[in-house]
Amino acid sequence: MSRTARRTTDTDTRVALLVFDGVKLLDVAGPSEVFGESRRYTVALCSPDGADVRTSIGVRLAVDARADRIGPVDTLLVPGSDAFPAAPTPPDVLTALRGLAPGARRIASVCTGAFVLAEAGLLDGRRATTHWRHTATLAHRYPRITVEPDAIHVGDGRVFSSAGVSAGIDLALALVEQDHGAEHARDIARSLVVFMRRPGGQSQFSVPSRTAEPRGHPLRAVLDRIAADPAADHSATALAAVAGTSTRHLTRLFHEALGTTPGRYVELVRLEAAQALIVAGHTVTSAAARSGLGSDETLRRVFLRHLNVSPTAYRNRFAASDAVSWTP
């Protein structure tokens, strides 16, 4: 979908969520709150047979209509379930989706709802994501999909997908922004007290959370020190002192536990800090200094090496009002 497709009227637009027994409650509630808070959408729940459903935590959801009687749908959302990665999608859910999809302007999944879109063939030849625990399964089971394992949300044409649970809120905000502009989406984010700018192309997890070692591991104090202050002195000598070991043994520990070197790990943490600073509005010079990367040139080299994009291009992509990453 092109950016020129943004809606300019304030007319109510129907958002339908296809729900079923075992659906994740937050996958339903998060996006529903975003669209409901906007007051420019009507939100309705439908199920394959029109019956109320019970969520994965046992809470019962009242359904507005049977899927084939929900009426015109602008945005169709398919939330996830813990069952989808391991078990086939129920036939009635697939039938309901296939009946609704052709008439919807856009279709989106939350978390493992991507498996339902994939089974229906809606992700064939497209980029997509899902919860980080299941990206490998999605890619293996559906080889025609280009799975982006770290992305928070991805859009390709009229089909969107998002990562686990709270990422559905990020995607809903991005879709609202696409329809009604950045200021309206920011107002909703402020009202809901959520972070507005978690760009779709950002990683689902920070470097420290992806590499955390069990408590008591010799590197635990070192990793905590780096995460607490990326810009501090994290030379091999300084980190070896924190670990109480030699620089040679420190390098061996990093290789054995994390498959990388101390220097590369520090660089990745500093890169992540710089990304957050740039998205928050800092200049390239300020981001370089505050992240510990030092100079503009070093920051540029690190961005190009790991992200294949310059800091300026990254800022233009993520710090501007382009809150959702999609391909026309």
Image (cartoon, grey):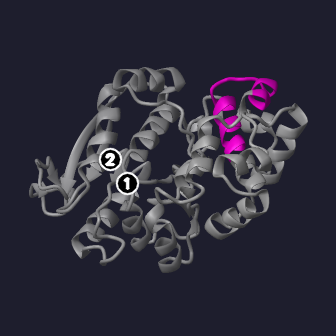
160 lies above or below 122: above
Residue 324 sits in which quadrant? top right
Label 2 sits on a secondary structure element that is loop
Q: Where residue 88 appears, x then y in whole percent?
A: 31, 78
Q: Position of residue 290 (x, y in %)?
A: 73, 28
Q: Looking at this view, is 76 or 271 the one in front? A: 271
Q: Residue at x 53, y 70 (%)?
A: 124
Instruction: Give the residue type that dot 2 points to.
Output: Val
Residue placed at 44% from the left, 48% from the top?
Answer: 105
Of residue 21 and residue 301, the one placed in the foreground of this image is 301
**Quarter-of-image position of residue 171:** top left
The amino acid type, in three-letter code, at marker 1 is Gly
Q: Going by the picture, which residue comes out furthest to the right?
A: 297
Between residue 54 and residue 166, name the one nearer to us: 166
Percent across and percent down for residue 177 are 50, 31
Dominant SS in magenta: helix
For residue 273, side relative to residue 168 (left or right): right
Label 2 neighbour load within 10 Å: few <14, some 14-19, many 20+: many
Residue designated by label 2: 73
Between discs 1 and 2, the one toward the N terminus: 2
- Residue 284 part of the magenta segment: yes
| CB contact under 8 Å: marks 1 and 2 | yes
Q: Which residue corresponds to mark 1?
A: 103
Residue 277: within the magenta?
yes
Highlighted range, magenta: 269-289
